[in-house]
Image: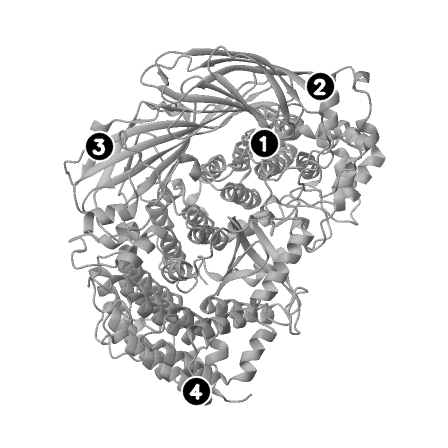
Amino acid sequence: MPVGCCIRALWVVNNLDAVVFSRRFPVVERRWQAACKTENESCSEDPVKYTVLPLLPTDSELAAAFAERKRREGSVRGFGIRVIQSTEGSDSWVDDPITRHVISLNIDVEEGGENHLLWPLVLHIKGPYSILVLPLVEPRHLKAYTRLCKRSDCGNAVGVDDSLSSLLLDLPSITGAFMVAHAIGDVITGDVLEPEVVVNASPSVGGLLDSLTGSIGISGISSRAKPVAAPVASSAPSGTAVVGTVTSDAPKLGSRALDKDALRSFISSAMPFGTPVDLNYSNIFAIKVNGFSSSDLPPQDLKQPAWKPYLYKGKQRLLFTIHETIHAAMYDRDEIPDSLSVSGQINCRAELEGLPDVSFPFTGLNTAHIEVLSFHPCAQVPEQGVDKQAVMFQPPLGNFVLMRYQAMCGLGPPVKGFYQLSMVSEDEGAFLFKLHLMEGYKAPLTMEFCNVTMPFPRRRVVSFDGTPSIGTVSTTEHSVEWKIVTSGRGFTGKSVEATFPGTVKFASWQIQRLPSSRSLIGSTVDEDSDAETENANNMVNIEEYLMEKMNKDLPSVDLEEPFCWHAYNYAKVCAMPFNSLFVLGFMTSGNNMKAVSFKIVGASISGMSIDTKSVSIYPTVKAPVEFSTQVTSGDYILWNTLGKCPSVATTQV
Amino acid sequence: MTDRATALKPFSWQDWESLIEDFQHGGARLTKWTSDYSITALVDLALSSLLKKDFPFKIPLLIFLEEYSLTLFSTPKPQNPSLHRLIEALRFAVQSPVDNFHITFAFKEQFMISTTCILISIDAFQVFDVKYVENVVELLLTVINRPNHGFDRHTRAIAAECLRQLEISYPCLLSDIAAHLWTLCQSERTHASQSYILLFTAVVYNIVNLKLNVSILNTSVPLVPFSVPQLMLGSNTGLNYKELRKAMAFFLESQQVFTPCGMLELLGMIMPVAVALELQPSMLKVQFFGMIYSFDPVLCHAVLMMYLNFFDAFDGQECEIAKRFMLVSKETQHFLVFRLLSVHWLLGLLNKLMLSIEVGKKKAIVELGLRIHLSVFDPLALKSLKLDLLAFCTIFLDILKSESALDGEIGEMKSVVKLFEDGLVSVSALKWLPPTSTETAVAFRTFHKFLIGASSHSNIDPSTTRFLMDSTIFHALQYVYQFSLEVGYDTFLGPCAVNYSEEENVI
C-alpha cells in the first residue's frame, strides 16, 4: 500500500460525551480489514493477535470509551506524562505529551466479541467539540503502540526501534489526520478565518468570496457573512490562553447547533472516500455556492491548479501586509539576559488575472536576524533552500499567508524598564514601574496606544493609591489598569518615559479552591487550617511566607502552558489590533499577574520590508502594489525584579 | 424478520433521520430496525426516496447507504436486484440535467461517490456479477470524457476520484484505457486536472507494481463501452520502460497543480514507480525537496517520506533536514501539535541515523541536536520533548566519547552534566512549587530520560543498575534527588519509582 493519508472514520463528540456527528469510510475500512487479515495470517505466533478484526465501533461504543478514557486519564486530553494514577494500557503509560493529541481508546464491544484498542485517534478540541479522526495505519503500527502502552519497563530506551517517535515519523497519515481534524473543527464552529490584509486606512479587505462577488457578479453570495478578518494572533493557536487564568480543557457548552449539512458537503469534496484531496474550506465552499459559469474559462496554455478553482477578473492590484508579534521576557537582572523575539508573517492578496508569477526581494532585512523562514505551498523554493533574499510564488485567490518567519528584534525593546513589587504586609503591596516606551524608535514608527493592566485573579483589590507620571488609572475587583497612552493620542518619533509608584491593598487571603481539572497529578491538596493561622510575623520575609502560603493550593497547569503563571509576579503585554495596547498586569505572591500589550504601526521591528517598486509580476501587467505593516505584542512580560521568575539557559552549547 | 415494507408508507425524511441515528448508535436501537424490516425493503424505500422530487434528505441518505453497504447490499449474490436498482438510479441522476433543485451537482457527486463506495465495500468485482462494476465504470468514464467542460468541472473531478478509488481497489481495472486517460489529463486545464492526473498516476502505479506489459500510448481499445480488461487475469510480462518514463516526466512537470494532500498522494505513488523504472532518486529530490521549507506539515512529512525511501540520494543532507525540523519546532504560529510532531520526527530520524550512518556524521548530527533551544514561552509539553532530544543527544555523546577515535574532538563539546543542568533550568520551579506541579512532573520525567535512556531496560539484567551508578548524570542528579527525597517527590514517579528507589539506596 503506498504511503499517504487515508481516514477510516471520524467522530465529533460534544461536551456531554455524546457523538453528534460520525462518518465512516468503507473503502478505507476495507483496506484495513484486508491488512488485518494478512497480518493475522503472517504472524501466527504474535502474542498481540486479533481473534476478531478490530472493527469500527458504533457511536455509542465510541462515546462510552471516550468518557471512560476521560475518567481514567483525568481530563479530555489526559495526563500526557506517566504519573502515579497512570494505568498499564493507557495513553499516559506511554509517558509522552503527544498522547494528549494522538490518543487510544479501549473499545468495549457491546454484543460479544473481544475488546480492542483503537489507535491512532487524532484528538482536536474546538469550541465545545472534540473531534476524533482515525487514520489508516498498518496493523503492525497498532501492535507497536499496544506494546508501548503495555510495556512493563518504565520508559524509552534510546536507540530502540518502535519508539513512539519512529511510529510518528513513519506515519504521514497521522499528520494528515491532524490537518483533517483542524479543517473539520473550522467547519463545525464556522470560524474559517482568512489572513488579514490591511489597505491604507480601511480596516481590511475581505476574503475569497468577496473577490468572487466582485469579479463574477453573483449577487447571491454577497449576502453571506463576510469572512471575519483574522488578526495575526489568530494564526498562533498555541499559547493563546488568556494569561493568568486557569482555563479548563473541558469544552464549554456549544452556542450553536452543529451544521451537519455543511460538514457533509465539506467531506464530500475534501475527502469523498476518506482520502483527503483538498482541505481548503474557502475554495470548497465557493464551489458549492457558486458553481461555475460559462465565463469561467480555463487558461489557454496552463493547467489551473487544484488550489485555485477560480481565476480573478477585474481591476488588478497586489496587497501585502506584514504582521509581527513581539514576544519578550524582560528580567532587568544581571544574571538573566532579556529575551526578545518576533514572529512575523507576510499576508498577501493578489488580485491579478490569469496565473502569473510574482516575485520580490526582501529589503531592509538583516538576514542574521531571521531564524526561520517558512512558505505557503504556492511559493517556489529551490532544492538548496531559501536564500533569504527573494521569493517567487504563484498566488492563490483571496487572502493568504505567503510566508512566516521567526526573527530577532532588529530594534531595541519597544517597552523597556522594570517593574518591582514588594509585599509590605500580607495584604498590601508596594510597586514601582519605570518604563521607557519606544526608546530609539524613529518615525514612521507609531505607538498607537498603551494600557497597563494589573490583574489579581487570586486576590480582591480593596483599595489603591498612587499616581503615574503619565496616563490614568482605574481599578476593578481583580485588577488595576494603567492607560499610559490612550487611543488617538499615539506618538511618533520620540520616546516616552513613564513611572508609576503606588500601593495596592487586598482583602485578606482566603484559601481558594481553584479548578484543578488539568492537574497532571490529580491529587487534592490537603487543606491544613493550622498552617493558615500561623503568625506571619514569625517569618523573616513576608514575601516568602506569603508565597509559600499561597502556593500551597496552586493548581498544576496544563502541559500546553509554558509554566505556572499564577506562581509569578509579572507584567504582560497583550496584542490589541489597531491599537497599541500595553497591558501591564501583575500578581502578588503567586496569584496576580502583570501584563503588557501594545501595537505599533509604520514599520516592522524585525526590519522585514517589501519594496513595492521591486515587486515583479510575470507575465508583466500594470498593477499597483500596496504594503502595510503592523506590530502587536504577544507574550510581553516584565517579571517582578524582586520576585521569582521562570527562565531558560540562554545557550545550550 | 417480517417483511412489512410493502404495507408501509414511504418514510418521511424525519423517519430516515432517526433510522440513520439508530444505525450509527448501534446496539438495540439498530436491532429494532433490522428485526422489524427486511433489508431489501429498506433499500427499496431508500432508492425510491432518492428519486423523489421533493425529498430534502437525499445526501444523508446516500451516505447512509454507503456507510452500511455491507449490511444493505451483501446479499443476494452474484445477482443483486438492489444493486441493479441502485445503479439504474445513479444512471438516472447522472444523466438528468441539473435544475438546482431536484437534481443538483452535489446530488450527482454524492450519488457517484456512494455507489462507487458500495461497489468497493461489498467487493462487487469479485463477489458479484462483473457487469455491475462495468456499468458504473462506463458511466463514470462518460462523465470524465468531456475535458475542460465548464459547468460540471467539479463533478468531473469527483468522477475521476471515483475511478481512482476503483483502480486502487482493483489494480489495472483501467489499464487498457490508460492512453485515453493520459490524453484526458493532458487536455484538462481546469482545477479538475489534479483529479485526472491522480487517476492516471494510480493506473501507472498499478501497471508498474504488477509489471504489466501494456502500452499507455495505444488507444486501440475504446474508452467506452467499457469492459474489464483481460490483463487483470493474465500473467506479468514486463514493463514498457520508455512509455512509463515519459509518463513519469509528465507527473513531475505537473507538480504545480497539486494541493498539499494531492501532493502526498502523488508522491506516495510515484516513489515506488521511480524505483521500479530505475530512475535516479535525485530527480525527485530536485523537484520536491524545496517543500520542506513549506509551513504545511503534510508537505514537510512528504519530504521526510521521500528521504526515508531514498536514504542514499540524500546523503549529506541529514543535517539540513534535522536543522529544518529543529526550526519548525520554534514556529510559534503553528498549532502546538505540529511543533511537538516536528520534535518527534527529529527524534525518530536521529534514531534511524544513529543506527546507520558513519561516526563522523553522527557527531555532526548530535552536535546539531544539542543546539536545540528552549524558549521560556515554550509550552511545557514542548519543553518536555526538547529535553528528551537533549537527553537523546547526551546519551549518544557518551557513546561517541567511548569511541576512542573521536576522543579529542568530543572532549571539546560541552559536558553532559552542563547540558543536563542547563536543560533543567526551564523547569527549575520544581524546587519551590507544590509537589503536584506540572513542572515537577516534567522535571522528573527528564531525570528519568537522562538517567536510564541508555540502559538495557531489562528487569533481570544487573548491569542496568551498575550502568546507572557509573553514569555522570547519576552523580549530578544525586544532589537534586536528595532534595526531592526531603519533600517526598518520589510519589510522582509512579511506576518509575522502582528505578529511583534503587538509586536511593546508593545515595
- Whole-angstrom CA distance, mark 3 to mark 4, is 65 Å
First in residue order: circle 2 vs circle 3: 2
Answer few, some or many: residues within 10 Å of disc 1's Cα (few below 14, many 20 plus, some between 14 and 19).
many
Q: Is residue A351 above or below residue A222?
A: above
The reply to whether discs 2 and 1 touch (Cβ–Cβ < 8 Å) is no
Q: Nearer the viewer, mark 2 or mark 3?
A: 2
Given the image, on which type of amino acid does mark 2 rest?
A: Glu
Badge number at residue A596: none
Badge number at residue B78: 4
Identify the residue under disc 2. Answer: A543
Report whether B157 appears left or right of A145.
left
Q: Nearer the viewer, mark 1 or mark 4?
A: 1
Residue B43 image offset from top left, x and y in percent: 43, 81
- Label 3's element? strand
Residue A362 image offset from top left, x and y in percent: 30, 28
Query: Disc 3: which chain?
Result: A
In this view, the residue in front, A31 or A439, is A439
- Label 2's element? helix
The reply to whether discs 1 and 3 touch (Cβ–Cβ < 8 Å) is no
Q: Nearer the viewer, mark 2 or mark 4?
A: 2
Quarter the C terminus of chain A occupies: top right
